[in-house]
Amino acid sequence: MQTAAAPADRGNEIASTIVATMGQMGVVGLPRNYEIFYEALTGSNPALSLELIALGDRPTQEQLDQIGRKFFAQNHGQGIVEQAREVLARELEGVASLLRSERSHIERYGKVLDETSSGLNSRTAMSQELLQKIVGVMSVATASTIDHGKQVASTLGDKSAELETVKSKLEEYKKLADTDPLTHIWNRRAFDKRIAGIYNDKRGVLFGALILADIDRFKEINDRHGHPVGDKILRVIADIFQSSAHRDMFVARTGGEEFALIIDGTNEDATFEIADRIRLLVAQTQLVDLEPGLNCGQVTVSMGVCMAAEADNADDLYAKADRALYRSKLVGRNRVTRYSTIAERQGKNWLLYKKD
């Protein structure tokens, strides 16, 4: 039987291993480096672990930062934006320089045309030989201008491709910045933007709904089995939410053990059924072998439902769904409560309840 001190001992062991490993590899003890090695050595992010192993025994800080930007965009976003800004500034200056060069070239060509036109319009008789020279000069000037224009067009095409690459990187960062790195579903930042959009049109208010969910007694799970196991449970439950949601539903991890679903085009009964179906799926999932020989037993979630029409704005909608969630916790957990059924007449007892 595992003792109460075991999780703390395990945490100290992991910390010591991380520090020792970083020292052996010559990695500077920066917080962002510790974050990478924690994920790798606890096995909670296999993809990150493989990329770190591929760097060899002496990774450079630049290589580690590349991994950090990829897997922890929310912590490295400023660097990505600054890098993109520098590239954009450099490329735009290059484009401006090309356009200045093209303008200068065209102005010179225009001057040749003006001078030639003035000469041709003069009354002075010109020999055939002089006319041929003028035509030759005009031909060379025209060909040079056309060639220069082609070069500018080609270079602008290259610049456009480079700028498109920067755009793609920024789009990738935007997606990563809105994604929870542990569960790979939307994060709180994306959720806040999405819930605010509900009240931008009448349809959102009439047919929108919010479901909030919280894993029951998750702190006890972490204390008993350790955070790496807790992280794996979070991923399992996130997968259940994601796979159970229809394409038009928005699924996010909004906090440590908290999840949210935003649904459009439904009524309260249908929303309740969706929430209860997910609750049952979580309760029926056998969480075994998250670590060799480990059986975590049953894990359940409590949920709260509120229709957008019952709230004045996004903050009010979240508060009321959260109130329904707390009600589920208060009356026994592992259930779904509709905000419409608790009403204000039941008083403020939910404020006294401490979620766990």
Image (spheres, helix red, strand yellow):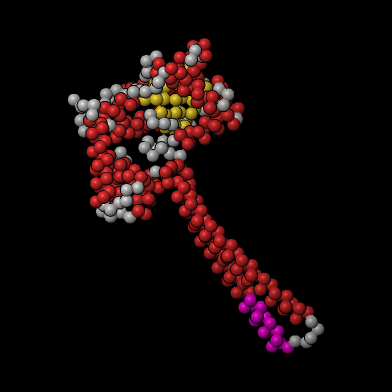
Furthest residue to the top?
345
Q: Position of residue 49 (x, y in %)?
A: 29, 45
Left or right: where 316 falls relative to 7: right
Does residue 189 lie above or below 22 as drawn? Answer: above
Q: Residue at x 26, y 27 (%)?
A: 224
Q: Residue at x 25, y 39 (%)?
A: 14
Residue 140 painted magenta: yes
Q: Does the image show residue 336?
A: no
Q: Position of residue 309 (x, y in %)?
A: 56, 22
Picture quarter containing residue 37? top left
Q: Over which residues does the magenta segment extend?
A: 127-141
Front-most of residues 14 and 311: 14
Q: Position of residue 64 (x, y in %)?
A: 35, 51
Front-most of residues 67 and 186: 67
Residue 242 painted magenta: no
Does residue 25 lie above or below 192 as drawn? Answer: below
Q: Does the image show residue 12?
A: yes
Q: Position of residue 26 (x, y in %)?
A: 28, 53
